[in-house]
Amino acid sequence: MTSPSFPPSRASSSKAVFVEGIWETQVMFWNRVPFTASNLWLSTSSSVLTAKRRYLRKKIGRMGTRAGLWHDCRSYVRARKAKFVFSKILIANRGEIAVRVIRACRELGIESAAVYSELDRNALHVRLADEAYALGGEVAADSYLNTSAILNVIEQCGADAVHPGYGFYSENAEFARAITDLGVTFIGPSPEAIEVMGDKISARLAAEKVGVKGVPGTTEVIQDPDEVRHFGAEHGYPVAIKAAYGGGGRGMKVVASAEDVDAALESAQREAESFFGRDECYMERYLTWPRHIEMQIIADQQGNVVWLGERDCSAQRRHQKLVEERPAPNFPDETRHAMGEAAVAVAKGCGYTNAGTVEFLFQDGDFYYLEMNTRLQVEHPVTELVSGIDLVREQIRVAAGESLSFTQDDVTCNGHAIEVRINAEDPAGGRFLPSPGTISSLRLPQGFGVRWDGGYEAGDVVSQFYDNLVGKLIVWGLDRETAIERMQSALVELEVGGIATTAAAHEAILSSADFKAGNHSTKWVEESLDLTNVSGGSDAPDGDIDVADPRVKKDVILEVNGKRFEVAAWVPESGGLGVNQSPAKARRSASKTGGAGGGSGQVTVPMQGTIVKVLVEVGQEVSDGEAVVVLEAMKMETNINADKAGTVKEVKVSPGDTVGAGDIVVVID
């Protein structure tokens, strides 16, 4: 940044007025601003003035009676139409979304600061960030959901903004308020808006207040399983139990009958607590064959709210999205506009700012409000590809107080985009069992209209303790048929070794006549799609990674006061680990039946995870296929079933135990 050599001759009447009388002061100000922090001073938002004063006092010294200089600076910047960017953004997340934000920061010339758990010490987002800081702990509760640890890092690194990504604390009003109380900008909606829309119960009330109707449901937290049974008796089954402070299908269970209520409520509460830090749940009628269509909106602090078009996310399993596309197929244009206007009404009704998504269910020509996600969505790239709008960049601008760079009339839909989520799951037989482990090799597709947003590279470990999203494969085509063909071609090129993935399931989905015709729904994958012969294994080499390094000069990771450094050190040939070395433990073989032991009575688990509930006791009679324990892996719960009928002879695990693939958990005579 160089200081201006002359004052502008005039300022447009539509811009802030430039006062020539303070020109000498302006020149002195720009000369005193450090070059490395120059971007910080380009703000046109009063919301960041406090942070700027604090920074200047720290770096340059007190300004005394020259406090009015700040407003003069704003006038000059507005007259020059300068764009604001923060000096440093901390990303309070991990995986592919952290990588996505880090890349956006790099393009804008903003320093990025990453945080990491013990297991993510050498993760991709840590390697790419300008700085990285340890949070400690392994599980999310001890790291990425550790508020005090994150706040300490913010103070330590001097970040002036925080991007929460999605999941973890992205929809937590208390976290957002703690950030803003530090004088740091939260890149997202206000804490007040999160409180209204992040709580799915109050969000239903807010939507009804602006005339947007939802699926029949309750507006109070479930206190007792009998409440669910009473609701089911009145409105009919199935009933959906959903996390009040969650989203993305986490903490959601569908109850088919009154007998299933207790177990489903307990499971939903456990998942909600694990993923969002709160276990409150509510309920609503579960539609039997709906399409899941959501509307992307973004709003600035000046009151402008724009809808950027819909996304069809109907291809799901366990209420988790697998395939997303924009625009939605077989979707009437008049319904599209009505849904967009409803989404804007919901956002305006709660004073919403920044990016958000209003989700609807669409069935028989009618749409119903489902929920609002007060954050960036996993599937945002499909909107970016057809609109040409960089949503993360726009998030940062809006958080800085800038107006949207476009209007509703500027929004277009050019072509068709499809995204598939490459999860570490084995879709064999439609079970979609988690598949943590080390990625031994990774070959990514390339070509026109192909994009990959990933959080891992070859040699990285996909842990059982976090979400299992490896990356997102996104394609663009001139029309839907072209996009489907391009995605099929890209999936042929994609190779992931060492773990099972959902790639084969995506090939089956895209090849289906139902999907090509746009006749699928949220129940279609689980109830209609034939995945009998699908395998999650990859054709890529699956051998162990060679971690031997014959050189004596090695890259070593050091931590100084919790801050991560990578240095080169001369060490004994047999000592120390290089930066990219992640030795993998040999995995024991396990049954591929989701818990069956081939009729032997020795019930094994198919993957590494944590036992959250034991459902049987010694001496109990069980039937073939009956659930005996509940295993949690990668934030998902899986029932492990008896492989034969008989009497339980031994229970080898207790709740909280960690088990590995192939471990015996229950023995049946």
Image (cartoon, rainbow, N blue to C red):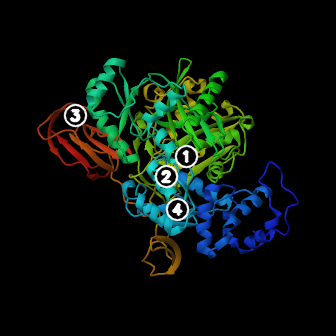
Q: Taking 442 as reference, is 405 left or right?
A: right
Looking at the rendered structure, the kind of residue marked 3 is Lys
Estimate the x, y position of residue 93 in percent, counting from the top left: 49, 55
Q: Quadrant of residue 426?
A: top left
Amino acid type, label 4: Ala
Mark 2 is surrounded, within 10 Å at the Cα level, by few (under 14), some (14 to 19) or many (20 or more) other residues, namely many
Pointer 2 residue = 176
Mark pair 2, 4: CA separation: 17 Å
Q: Which mark is residue 644?
A: 3
Mark 3–mark 2 CB contact (< 8 Å): no
Residue at the spot x=46%, y=30% of the render?
205
Vertical position of residue 204 compared to residue 76: above or below: above
| Vertical arrangement, residue 631 with respect to residue 560, above or below | above
Say if mark 1 contacts mark 3, CB within 8 Å.
Answer: no
> From the image, which quarter does the N terminus lie in?
bottom right
Q: Nearer the viewer, mark 4 or mark 1?
A: 1
Q: Earlier in the sequence, mark 3 or mark 4?
A: 4
- Name the side, left or right, on which 244 lies relative to 227: right
